[in-house]
Image (tube, helix red, strand yellow):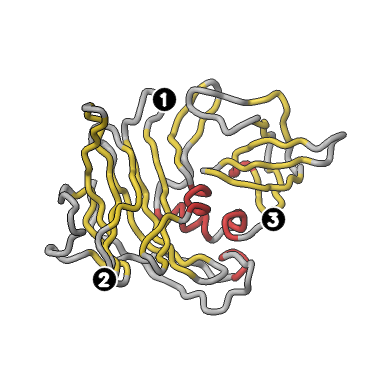
Amino acid sequence: MKRFLLGLLFFSFASLSAGASNFDSGIYAVARDLRFAEDDEHCDGVPVDRAFQPVKWGDTLVCFDYEEVRRDGLHFPDVIALHTKSSFGPSAKVHYFSGVANSGTIQDVFLLSIAPAAEDRLFVIYRDPNPNRWFSALYQVAVFQLNGEGLSRDEGLSEFFGMGGDFSHDGLAYVFPYRSRKEIESSVNSALFRLATSSGEVIGTVQDKTYLYEKIPSADWNSITSSYLIKGDKVSVIDALAGWCNVTYSAGARPVKAWVKCESMIIN
């Protein structure tokens, strides 16, 4: 469903120290809207089959259009292609959002400032309501940055927010944690977000009995183990992907490395 009315405030990040996160700065980052492009503004050479109304980021035009995919004479499900056009160059294709027979939609597009350099990033939330029999919905959060050559994907932040779907299977219930602007905004202002903006690790305190997973589970594959952590256990969190945290527990006879739901811990 297209959304053409977006509206929130913004706080600046004029004096953040190197290596700090939004959480460390004590300043709460609030999502900001982009200006929608005029009707006659479009990315040159791109078929105008809009999946979302084009937006302007400074002098850069960002377009979201359905694109037909053909390979070896076969017609594959259409995708949503993100194109950009700057004031000093031609249109360029930056990213694909894969859909199923045009069922995918762009849910939201907005800006957030990311510490430590107070740099803006463009966030795009994509949703496919009917990806397959396992997921009730599939989400992807893609993050982009402006550089001297135009728009490019921020690989680190895109990996942190990631892709995932809501599912309940084999005793595991999972809800993708970054389905909305509000949830992403909250994450950017959390202690866990340090993992996305600086090297090193953070410390987590387990809130309740939490089972360990060998790998990040999916809707059709559950990697749960018989091992678990209990309330009060301290772990080192070394990575986070789509709401799953890779942790190391060192209080036992030997260190244990595994994946747990990030929501099962309080990050110190």
Question: Residue type at mark 2?
Answer: Ser
Question: Marks 1/2: CA distance?
Answer: 44 Å
Q: Name the residue rendered at 36%, 60% in the picture.
A: 110
Element at label 2: loop
Q: Which residue is mark 1?
A: 134
Question: In the rendering, at what x and y percent does residue 203 appear?
Answer: 71, 52
Q: Which sits earlier in the primary sequence, circle 2 or circle 3?
A: 2
Q: Label 3 sits on what residue type? A: Gly
Task: Compare marks 1 and 3 and give the one earlier in the sequence.
Answer: 1
Q: How crowded is the residue under tag 2: few (<14 C-alpha within 10 Å), some, or many (20+)?
A: few
Q: Quadrant of residue 30?
A: bottom left
Marks 1, 2: nearer the viewer: 2
Which secondary structure, mark 3?
loop
Q: Which residue corresponds to the image point at 58% horizontal and 60% vertical from the top-left? A: 197
Q: Residue drawn at (76%, 42%), measured in percent from left and top?
A: 233
Residue 187 placed where, x, y %? Answer: 52, 55
